[in-house]
Amino acid sequence: MIDERWAQAARSLKSRAEFWSLRIVDEQIDDHEVRNDIAQPLRTVRDRGAMLIAWVGAGAGYAATANLSAAGLQQALDLATARAEASAALSLIDHREVARPSASGEYVSPNAQHTLPGRAEWIDRLGAECAAAKLDSRIVERVAAMQIIHTDQLYMTGDGVRIDQRFRFVMPQLSVAAHANGDTQVRTLGGNYGTLGQGGMDVLARFGFDGCGPRVAAEALQLLAAPNCPSGKRDLLLMPDQMMLQIHESIGHPLELDRILGDERNFAGWSFVKPDMFGSYRYGSELLNVTFDPELREEAAAYAFDDDGSEAHKEYLIRNGVLERPLGGALSQQRAGMPGVANSRASNWNRPPIDRMANLNIEPGDSSLDEMIGNIEHGILMRTNTSWSIDDHRNKFQFGCELGQLIENGKLTQIVKQPNYRGISANFWRSLSAVGNADTREVYGTSMCGKGEPAQIIRVGHASPACVFSSVDVFGGA
């Protein structure tokens, strides 16, 4: 919990800046892991500090400090103010025209008041899943892990805005490797770092962690015995744990407004999306409805305010297949002259906020899973991302999955290994031919989205139903 003495110190700050803000982050990460029935060393990371931002005239400056005393915060604010003054005459952006935060408020993760198990109980719980995954001698590696993150944030401005946000993230993981005859197959619970959510023990139930050891191990053994994925054009049924990656790479990153404006082109790439596309460009079929939804509180990137103090609400980015709105916070909105969303986010106290994905979701359709399978004559179902590659305009892509299952004449048939598919983002989304109903929808999240200079690794969430894409280029691994 944020120490109220830090808030008192913030209230004592003085500055000649026309606007200033303070953001304090206090975060603790606890890692637990059992590998092949052996408990690994426990790990705890505690990190806290403050970012001060000042606006003077057209200019802006920022400074970070781990010294949360009144003197330490004042020193950082003075430095930020001096930098803002120095940049005012040269700034490409007039910060006097950027929207300033006006509302105070708070946010608390769901079930954050519920007590979680202690370290010994976590190790016992992980050990039980790890042991249960050893079905036979072909299982050569079993790893069960649990990460718990507590993050407290305080945001204050010189004109009286105060925002308190408390987050608790839980990420259960299980990975099983099977080996025989020179072949190794890995099956995981929701992919690597894909099972992140806000909450308490309910997160384990959401991802089916309890009792998952034997199931995941059995699927790894099935993959050992399976043939390679065939190559050719097929209808593709993507399950939600793979839709997470598809949304992330071919919708999320291309729609980040600072990237569209060119900020990332020398590092993480540009975007095939251009500002004049909004309002008219057909991004996908009429079945495609994509929302920025920070109000889905169990999802990894739910919050009430972004890190620049803007109130966060659900907004449609793509409606009935047509591109409506970019992922751009207050600063990018001023630069581009178009509406955006509250997605200025920083990975920690020592990074300034930039445009980031948050909860980026596909809204459910009206097809059941049985209906989608039944309507496919020649297709393949794929689950759980294992590899990804996409060009620096976030357009041409190639993704691989852990598990595939052929669909023939409306029936699920043979399991296949090393399934892959490729396409071009807009063409791919325009081939969307069926969207699953709410019963097929699942909520996933990751802690590993990278962007920015200096680099920022941040948490994002993706909720999606199962989806069918027509006539996709599918191929097997080597």
Image (spheres, rainbow, N blue to C red):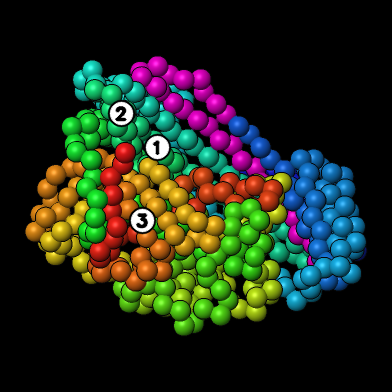
Magenta span contains residue 22: yes
The residue lying at 56 percent from left, 49 percent from top is 450
Instruction: Tell me if label 3 and label 2 are in contact, CB under 8 Å.
Output: no
According to the image, label 2 marks what residue? 184
**Mark before the other along the chain sequence, 2 or 1:** 1
Residue 349: horizontal and vertical position, in percent? Answer: 69, 47
Foreground residue among 295 and 275: 275
Magenta span contains residue 174: no
**Mark before the other along the chain sequence, 3 or 2:** 2
Q: Nearer the viewer, mark 3 or mark 1?
A: 3
| Residue 468 makes an appearance in the image | no
The residue lying at 87 percent from left, 45 percent from top is 71
Highlighted range, magenta: 19-44
Q: Tag 3: residue type?
A: Arg
Foreground residue among 466 and 149: 466
Give the secondary structure at mark 1: strand
According to the image, label 1 marks what residue? 172
According to the image, label 3 marks what residue? 422
Residue 126: horizontal and vertical position, in percent? Answer: 36, 27
